[in-house]
Amino acid sequence: MRLGRKINGHVVRTVHQEGWSGKKNGVLLAQMSSAGFDVLLTVDQGLRYQQNLKSSGVAVVVMFGASNQLADLAPLVPSVLLALETVRPGDVVEVRA
């Protein structure tokens, strides 16, 4: 959750912390919505093509870094924070370097 510590002003939980590791994306989105989560922050670039996100009840912010390493994702945090201010359930926002 090292990246989560950089998302100031928001409660950040990982899939692992919630006990949802290994869940298929559709099940994961449904569980997130039921548990009251608003946004999924992910590096899964194909998620928007695999799920009906409009009806999921969860917004998705997709981070596009040079890799999935913290050093490549951390510079995207200011843009993620801006996206979190306006994103709504069913929206997909891409954040790029």
Image (cartoon, rainbow, N blue to C red):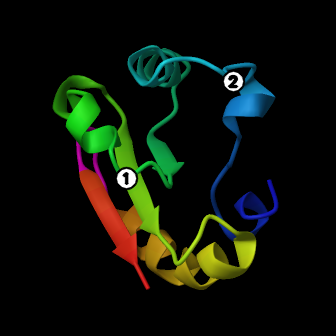
> Magenta residues?
87-91
Q: Position of residue 14 (x, y in %)?
A: 70, 40
Distance from Cα at disc 1 to Cα at disc 2: 18 Å
Front residue of this view, candidates 8 and 48? 48
Q: Is residue 12 left or right of residue 57?
A: right
Crowd tier of the residue under label 1, counting other residues whose Cα lies within 10 Å: few below 14, some 14–19, many 20 or above: few
Crowd tier of the residue under label 2, counting other residues whose Cα lies within 10 Å: few below 14, some 14–19, many 20 or above: few
Front residue of this view, candidates 97 and 92? 97
Where disc 1 sits, the SS reads loop
Q: Residue at x 70, y 69 (%)?
A: 69
Tell me, yes or no, whether the highlighted magenta stretch contains residue 53.
Answer: no
Which residue is label 1 attached to? 45
Q: Judge whether 78 appears above or below 93 on screen.
A: below
Per the picture, the main secondary structure of the magenta-coloured stretch is: loop
Which residue is label 2 attached to? 21
Q: Position of residue 58 (x, y in %)?
A: 36, 34
* Labels 1 and 2: the sequence-earlier one: 2
